[in-house]
Amino acid sequence: MKKLFFIFLFVGLFSSCKKNTPPTDNATCTNVIVTFTTGACKHAAVIIDNKTYPTENLPDSLAIEGKKLCIEYAFYDDVRACVCCGGRYVNIIKVN
């Protein structure tokens, strides 16, 4: 009986685990502006709703200051602890 209880307990715990899929905060195209002004560090970033978010996967051919793009994106939190990293980032899924 104890074995059966533990089997059901583990099955219940592991079946309710959250899958590790990237969140899609925005599945439709959103107009953004490319910038490089993200504090003391010169990262490519996008301006969404008057807030600036750094991004690490903007293609070099599109990384032009002031360029207007329409992107599909998802937010993620960067947990690195260094001077020019950490915080809320934008993962660009698709550029339209």
Image (cartoon, rainbow, N blue to C red):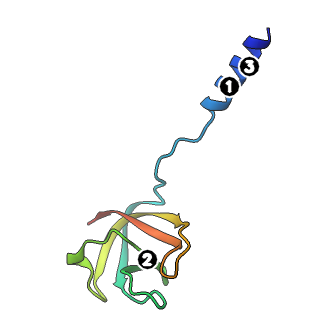
| Alpha carbon separation for disc pair 2 and 1 | 40 Å
Say which label, 3 or 2, has the lower sequence index: 3
Question: Is the residue 15 above or below the residue 84 in the image?
Answer: above
Q: What residue sits right under mark 3 in the picture?
A: 6
Q: Amino acid at mark 2?
A: Pro
Q: Picture coordinates of residue 47 (x, y %)? A: 43, 81
Distance of label 3 from label 2 (alpha carbons): 46 Å
Amino acid on which the number 3 mark rests in the picture: Phe
The 10 Å Cα crowd at callout 2, few under 14, some 14 to 19, many 20 or more, is: many
- Secondary element type, mark 2: strand
Residue displayed at 74% across by 19% down:
6
Q: Looking at the image, tell me whether mark 2 or mark 1 is earlier in sequence order.
A: 1
Q: Identify the residue at image location x=35%, y=82%.
A: 33
Q: Which amino acid, mark 1?
A: Phe
Q: Quadrant of the N terminus?
A: top right
Residues 85 and 95: in front is 85
Alpha carbon distance from label 1 to label 3: 6 Å
Residue contact at pointers 1 and 3, CB within 8 angstroms: yes
In the displayed structure, 66 sits above or below 17; it is below
Task: Tell me the residue that label 1 is attached to.
Answer: 10
Q: Which residue is mark 2?
A: 54
Which x, y percent locates residue 60?
A: 23, 76
Q: Nearer the viewer, residue 41 or 75?
A: 41
| Residue 30, x across and y down, in percent | 38, 70
Q: Secondary structure at mark 1?
A: helix
Residue 50, given in percent of the width and then of the height, sits at 49, 84
